[in-house]
C-alpha cells in the first residue's frame, strides 16, 4: 500500500504534467507520438494513479519541452526547467507542419497490413486483378510494407543481437529473409541498413573498423546508451 505522502506526490506530479500538456496544446496521444509514454500511461500519471519508473520519467522531458531530468526532479518535489529551444519550431525556410515526422504504431497494425497486402498479392497472382493501375498501386504498397517490416526487424535485432550476444534461433529464423539477402543495394540508406542488420546478427565479414564503431554507437543508443546485460553478463 502506498503511503499518504507518496499518493500526494503522485497527485501533485499528475497535476503539473496535465497543466504543462494543456499549455503546449498537446493531447495524451500526441505525447506518445513525440516519444513520451503511451496515452494510457499518461492518463494514469495525470490521475495520480501510477507509480512512475525512472525510465518513464526520462521519456516525459522531450515531449513536454523540459530540460533533461526535469520530470524526475519534479516527481521528487522540485520544479521543472523549460527548454527554451523550441525543437518543433520551423526554420525560416521551412513550411509549418501540423504534426510530427513520425509516429509509433502497434505490432498488430503491422501484422494487419501484412495480411491485407498478402491478400492483394494473392489476387494479382491468381489473375483476379489485372488493371494496370491497381497492380501498380499494390506494388507501391508492397514497397511500403517491406520498409516497415525491415524497420521492425532492425528493432528486434537491436534488442536481441549485437556484440557478445548469440541470436536466438527463432529470431534468426524469423528474419532470415532479410539477413540472407546480399548487402549490396543501389540506395545508400538501404545498403547501410542491410549491413547493420547483418552486423547485429553477428555477420561481420564485410565490416571495417570505422563501420564497426558506427554500428556499435547506434546499437548502444538503441539500448539507452548502456551495454545490454543478459544472464548476468555483458
Image (cartoon, rainbow, N blue to C red):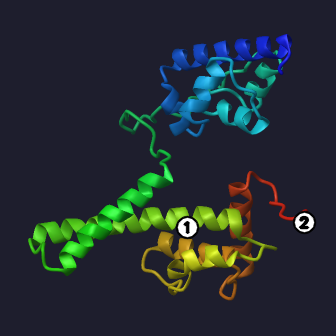
Depicted 67 relative to depicted 120: above or below:
above
**Residue beneath the point at 84% across and 61% down:** 229
Single out the residue that lies furthest toward the right: 232
Q: Is residue 3 left or right of residue 140?
A: right
Residue placed under numbered mark 2 in the picture: 233
Where the N terminus falls, by quadrant? top right
Residue for point 51% across, 78% down: 178
Quadrant occupied by the C terminus: bottom right
Q: Which residue is mark 1?
A: 153
Q: Residues within 10 Å of mark 1 (few under 14, many from 20)?
A: some
Q: Residue at x 61, y 64 (%)?
A: 156
Residue 64 seen in render: no
The residue nearer to you, when weighing 114 against 30, is: 114
Q: Earlier in the sequence, mark 1 or mark 2?
A: 1
Local SS, label 1: helix
List x then y, in percent, for residue 66: 67, 26
Percent coordinates x, y for residue 153 in the rendering: 55, 67
Amino acid at each position: 500500500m502506498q503511503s499518504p505522502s507518496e499518493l500526494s506526490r503522485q497527485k501533485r506530479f499528475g497535476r503539473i504534467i496535465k497543466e504543462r500538456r494543456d499549455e503546449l496544446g498537446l493531447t495524451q496521444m500526441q505525447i506518445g507520438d513525440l516519444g513520451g509514454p503511451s496515452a494510457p500511461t499518461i492518463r494514469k500519471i495525470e490521475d495520480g494513479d501510477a507509480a512512475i519508473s525512472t525510465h518513464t520519467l526520462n521519456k516525459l522531458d522531450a515531449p513536454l519541452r523540459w530540460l533533461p531530468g526535469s520530470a524526475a526532479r519534479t516527481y521528487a518535489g522540485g520544479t521543472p526547467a523549460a527548454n527554451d529551444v523550441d525543437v518543433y519550431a520551423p526554420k525560416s525556410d521551412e513550411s509549418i507542419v501540423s504534426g510530427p515526422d513520425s509516429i509509433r504504431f502497434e505490432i498488430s497494425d503491422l501484422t494487419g497490413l501484412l495480411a491485407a497486402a498478402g491478400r492483394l498479392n494473392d489476387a494479382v497472382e491468381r489473375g483476379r486483378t489485372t488493371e494496370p493501375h491497381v497492380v501498380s498501386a499494390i506494388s507501391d504498397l508492397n514497397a511500403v510494407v517491406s520498409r516497415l517490416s525491415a524497420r521492425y526487424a532492425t528493432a528486434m535485432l537491436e534488442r536481441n543481437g549485437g556484440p557478445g550476444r548469440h541470436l536466438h534461433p527463432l529470431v534468426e529464423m524469423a528474419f532470415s529473409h532479410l539477413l540472407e539477402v546480399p548487402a549490396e543495394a543501389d540506395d545508400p540508406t538501404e545498403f547501410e541498413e542491410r549491413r547493420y542488420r547483418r552486423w547485429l546478427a553477428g555477420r561481420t565479414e564485410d565490416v571495417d573498423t570505422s563501420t564497426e564503431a558506427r554500428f556499435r554507437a547506434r546499437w548502444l543508443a538503441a539500448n539507452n546508451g548502456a551495454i545490454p546485460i543478459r544472464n548476468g553478463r555483458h
